[in-house]
Image: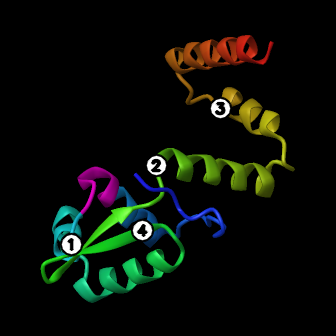
Amino acid sequence: MKKAPRSQKVVLPTPGELRLLQILWRISAGTIEDIVNASGENPLPNYKTVQTLLRIMERKGQVEHSQEGRAFVFRPLLERHDVHRLSIRETVTKYFTGSPTELLVELVRDERISPKELRELETLIRNRRKECR
């Protein structure tokens, strides 16, 4: 999958853009009609609204299209992990004074974190320490 052009700064998608990206990640590529139908929403999103959002997303470097017959087929240029990483960085900068440690401390203190998730975090931290040596 192609990445967003390096010369273009990747911006965090809006909630509406994220919904369309999630559909595209699930179906890999599709026409506007494919995207509308794959939304699973009831009622279905408005065709023109989806079309407009896709044009905006294309200008932002989030999606691209190719023409197949008379239809435009859209593909995501951003990968899910890129959006996750960007949203975490923005959250850390905005709410945790730029400190990933502060964010992690709050996550670990959260009473909703399960023992299994804590073990997974411990393993990730242990593995990351080994990588940094």
Q: Is residue 94 above or below residue 101?
A: below
Using a 10 Å C-alpha cutoff, classify the residue at mark 4 as few (fewer than 14 neighbours), some (14 to 19) or many (20 or more).
many
Would you name the residue on which mark 1 appears?
A: 31
Which SS class for mark 3? loop
Q: Residue at x 80, y 12 (%)?
A: 133
Q: Could you tell me residue 80's position as x and y percent? A: 46, 48
User: Sequence order check: which comes first, mark 1 or mark 3?
Assistant: 1
The answer to if 24 sits in the magenta stretch is yes
User: Sequence order check: which comes first, mark 1 or mark 4?
Assistant: 1
- Characterize the magenta stretch by its predominant secondary structure: helix
For discs 1 and 2, the disc positioned in front in the rendered view = 1
User: Sequence order check: which comes first, mark 2 or mark 4?
Assistant: 4
User: Sequence order check: which comes first, mark 2 or mark 3?
Assistant: 2
Would you name the residue on which mark 4 appears?
A: 63
Q: Could you tell me residue 116's position as x and y percent? A: 50, 15
For discs 1 and 3, the disc positioned in front in the rendered view = 1
Q: Could you tell me residue 86's position as x and y percent? A: 63, 53
Q: In this view, does 84 lie above or below 110?
A: below
Would you name the residue on which mark 2 appears?
A: 80
Q: Distance between the residues labelled 2 and 3?
A: 25 Å
Q: Distance between the residues labelled 4 and 3?
A: 36 Å
The answer to if 10 sits in the magenta stretch is no
Q: Could you tell me residue 2's position as x and y percent? A: 44, 56
For discs 4 and 3, the disc positioned in front in the rendered view = 4
The type of colouring in the image is rainbow
Q: What is the number of the mark on residue 110?
A: 3
Q: Give the range drawn in magenta.
A: 23-29
- Rendering quarter of residue 49: bottom left
Q: Which residue is drawn at 84% across and 41% down?
A: 99
